[in-house]
């Protein structure tokens, strides 16, 4: 895949290449697993009409929320000018 840009990890400041990701056009929660420890999700991509289903542990969603909050906080500090 071609490189889209580069980024730095927040903790180590390591440079990592960002590659062009697969474009998701639909993401839906379909059901819980019988033990209610996983969520069955459905994904559709830009270049395929096939719907794919995945079983995702609930902990992954907690981690995703934390990651989104962290990214939002990083974006806020970058976009907010420092007044002097």
Image: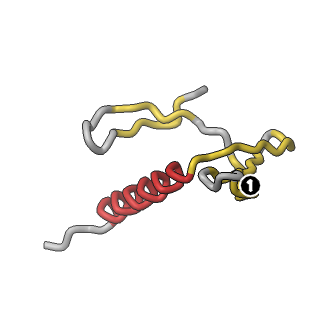
Q: Residues within 10 Å of mark 1 (few under 14, many from 20)?
A: few
- The structure residue drawn at horizontal position 33% and vertical position 40%, both measured from the top left corner, is 9
- The structure residue drawn at horizontal position 26% and vertical position 38%, both measured from the top left corner, is 13
Indicate the position of residue 59 as horizontal and vertical percent values: 50, 51
Q: Nearer the viewer, residue 11 or 22?
A: 11
Indicate the position of residue 11 as horizontal and vertical percent values: 26, 42
Indicate the position of residue 46 as horizontal and vertical percent values: 76, 45
| On-image quarter of the C terminus | bottom left
Asked if residue 17 lies left or right of residue 29, the reply is left
Asked if residue 59 lies left or right of residue 37, the reply is left
- The structure residue drawn at horizontal position 64% and vertical position 56%, both measured from the top left corner, is 36
Q: Nearer the viewer, residue 16 or 26?
A: 26
Furthest toward the right, the residue is: 49
Would you name the residue on which mark 1 appears?
Answer: 26
Question: In the rendered view, would you say 27 is above or below 16?
Answer: below
Hey, which quadrant is residue 68 in on the image?
bottom left
Q: Nearer the viewer, residue 48 or 62?
A: 62
Asked if residue 60 lies left or right of residue 7, the reply is right
Question: What colouring style does the render use?
Answer: secondary structure
Asked if residue 57 lies left or right of residue 14, the reply is right
Furthest toward the left, the residue is: 84
- Tally the marks: 1
- The structure residue drawn at horizontal position 35% and vertical position 62%, both measured from the top left corner, is 73
**Secondary structure found at label 1:** strand
């Amino acid at each position: 895949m071609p490189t889209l840009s580069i980024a730095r990890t927040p903790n180590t400041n390591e440079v990592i290449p960002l590659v062009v990701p697969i474009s998701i056009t639909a993401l839906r929660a379909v059901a819980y697993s019988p033990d209610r420890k996983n969520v069955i999700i459905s994904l559709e991509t830009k270049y395929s009409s096939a719907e794919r289903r995945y079983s995702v542990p609930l902990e992954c969603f907690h981690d995703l929320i934390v990651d989104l909050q962290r990214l939002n906080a990083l974006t806020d500090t970058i976009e907010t000018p420092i007044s002097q």
